[in-house]
Amino acid sequence: MTATRRQARVGRAGRGPDDRRRAGRGAAEDAGLPGWVFLPAGAAVLVIVVPVLGMLLRVPWSRFPALVSSEASVAALALSLRTSLSATVLCVLLGVPLALVLARARLPGLRVLRTVVLLPLVLPPVVSGLALLTTLGRRGLLGSRLEALGIDIAFSTTAVVIAQTFVSLPFLVLSLEGAARTAGQRYERIAATLGARPTTVLRRVTVPLLLPALASGTALAFARALGEFGATLTFAGSLQGVTRTLPLEIYLQRETDPDAALALSVVLIAVAAVMVLATQRWPRPDSRPGDPVAPASPTTGRIRQATPDESSPIRPLGPPRVPATPISVHASVPERDIYLDVEVPGGGVLAVLGPNGAGKSTLLGLLSGLVRPGAGTVRIGARTVAGPDAWVAPHARRVSLLAQEALLLPHLDALGNVAFGPRATGTPRAAARGVAQAALDRVGVAHLAGRRTHQLSGGQAQRVALARALAPEPDVVLLDEPLSALDVDAAVAMRQALRTVLRESGRTAVLVTHDLLDVLALADDVVVLEAGRVVEQGPVLEVLTRPRSAFAARLAGVNLVAGSLRLGDADGGAVVAEPGPLVLHGLVDPACRPDERVAATFSPRAVSVHRDPPGGSPRNTVPVVVASLEHLGELVRVHAGTADGHRLAADITPAAVAALELDAGAAALFTVKAAEVAIFPA
Ligand SMILES: Nc1ncnc2c1ncn2[C@@H]1O[C@H](COP(=O)(O)OP(=O)(O)OP(=O)(O)O)[C@@H](O)[C@H]1O
């Protein structure tokens, strides 16, 4: 005996009740469940297993082959398999569309429809049979008309299939609808922006993603059809070889030959169990047997350090490849209280900034076609893609979307994902794969072509997603916080990749971001949205050096006070803040006009902080209350508010914070020289 085997035996022999209890606790803890849950769960299993075991023990196994191979038994089994399979096919053909409508359509009365569809689950089978008989039977509502046409359904094999379909359909619909709801429509939306028509999206995205749920729903429907008894007997009768299915045969045999009934019951259970077991082994779309185990699930979420290939270079594309496509959005979405006027010149990159709920995603939705405007127009190049008399569907807009999550289709490898767009727009398979390989090469990840999506890191997945967005050669690329889910290193590499790709291709792009680095590296122009309105728009440099909105000022790291101009001071003028009474003296831009609104900005570094009124007289002294302290490298940023609600910041050394004994709630004075305050038109 080898040492290892001996140890294993000793280990097993040495497992006392304490060890077992510990192991049980471990299993419960692993599952994140309280230990007592296993008790009722075990009892539930017993409720099912004990009767089945009891039956199995009573089966005369020595006579089993003879009992199940009588002519009547074989005919019943063959009929059951035939009709159950037909009913299952009908369930799939009708149930899949129904489940998707229930899960995704926005129709009035869906709740009522769902209740009606699930009704056969709660109806006694004999009632289901009666319903079918009174409708499709010879004297039934439809049956009498069908009989006039020479079609006689009741008491035929067709009636068996209809009865089985009637009772099985809800099983498939229920499991598929639940999965479709949980899965959401994120992948479908991405597929539409890659040029896929709704039918292509259904065939190549929705169904593959829902395959595990479809498989288990199909198995349940088959098992239910196989076990169907009451409705079949009522509606179809019990004619050997025509309508006498296995459950009916078992019922009849029970009277004459109980042993045969038991043996046939075992066959019925075995067939149903094999079917259900087989579909439970159905692979999830994001894994395949034999795939090496990936370190993380990286198509979503924040992952880890960049790998060498995430920082690998982007291949130059050569001269611009797409005609510059200007964009204009003059549209509103009243139910969201959003009214937008945004222009992007052809080939420009517009950064969209704004606080949460400002309308940034809605702007992208208006451009991609995922949001319909209530009024106004959206133009992309020469086309009006949304307007009073115009609507171009998302798949026909030539607008790709790269989202925060890579959302790579889990049932395709990297190359398949990138080839998806060209394939969806009609490029033959081999050519599409060529285009995809070139696109992967362009963003420096050609060697990842054969990887499954769960074998990619976050940065790699996002690069593949970028290649996928570019492969259909869109006129416009929409970037919805494409770097925000990546760690710092991967984000740096991805930002560089985006910069190169956008510059080289000359593509018009709209970038939603909260990151100043993205704005600086990628954008030409900036638009700032607040509460569904454009509050500021202009070239990056202008907006960051002379922000007119609180959001842009925060992003640029400067203090901003807006108000009206008061001229006539010795050094030029002052901003009378709104709300007052704060007045800030500063250097007035010659473009300022007396009656216009103006903004004053100054750097937090130009602010001195005091607890008592300072000696000398800097032109601006503002009483504040400290709100919070923030550590910024070698300095501390003191966030404070004035009595009239202005938020200001000062950057001072940690030693100064200690000397002044500053903390949240402390009263202080911010002072800033007039020469440090720039006043310009707002
Ligand atoms: N499907 C929807 N139905 C109704 N209102 C919506 C819907 N989606 C968003 N809104 C509302 O529209 C407004 C703008 O939302 P939007 O998602 O465009 O903002 P955002 O700037 O992208 O915000 P965030 O930075 O949080 O993503 C918000 O008031 C939001 O509540």
Image (cartoon, rainbow, N blue to C red):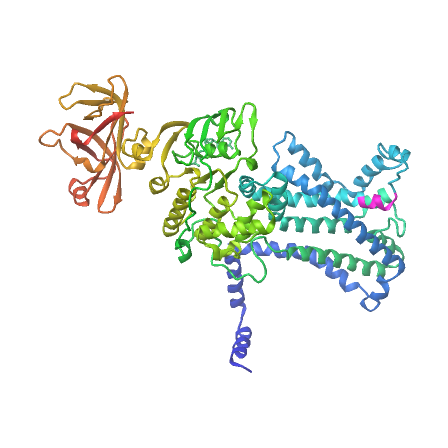
Residue at the limit of the structure toward the top, as seen here = 595
Residue at the limit of the structure toward the left, as seen here = 616
Which residue is more in the foreground, 185 or 81?
Answer: 185
Q: Is residue 157 magenta?
A: yes
Query: Which residue is at 48% across, 31% downward?
Result: 381
Q: Is residue 356 magenta?
A: no
Would residue 491 be found to the left or right of residue 103 on screen?
left
Q: Indicate whether 230 appears above or below 21.
A: above
Query: Which residue is at 28% across, 19% downward?
Result: 596
Query: Which residue is at 32% across, 29% downward?
Result: 549
Q: Indicate whether 617 appears above or below 57.
A: above
Task: Evaluate whether residue 343 shows in this view.
Answer: yes
Would residue 665 be found to the left or right of residue 39 on screen?
left
Query: Which residue is at 57% across, 63% downward?
Result: 290
Quadrant hosting residue 12: bottom right
Q: Could you say where residue 183 lies in the image, as x and y percent from the top left?
A: 57, 44
Q: Could you say where residue 673 lies in the image, as x and y percent from the top left?
A: 15, 31
Q: Could you say where residue 94 lies in the image, as x and y percent from the top left?
A: 72, 41
| Span highlighted in magenta in the image | 155-161
Task: Evaluate whether residue 227 shows in this view.
Answer: no
Q: How many marks?
A: 0
Q: Indicate whether 185 appears above or below 373.
A: below
**Picture quarter with the C terminus:** top left
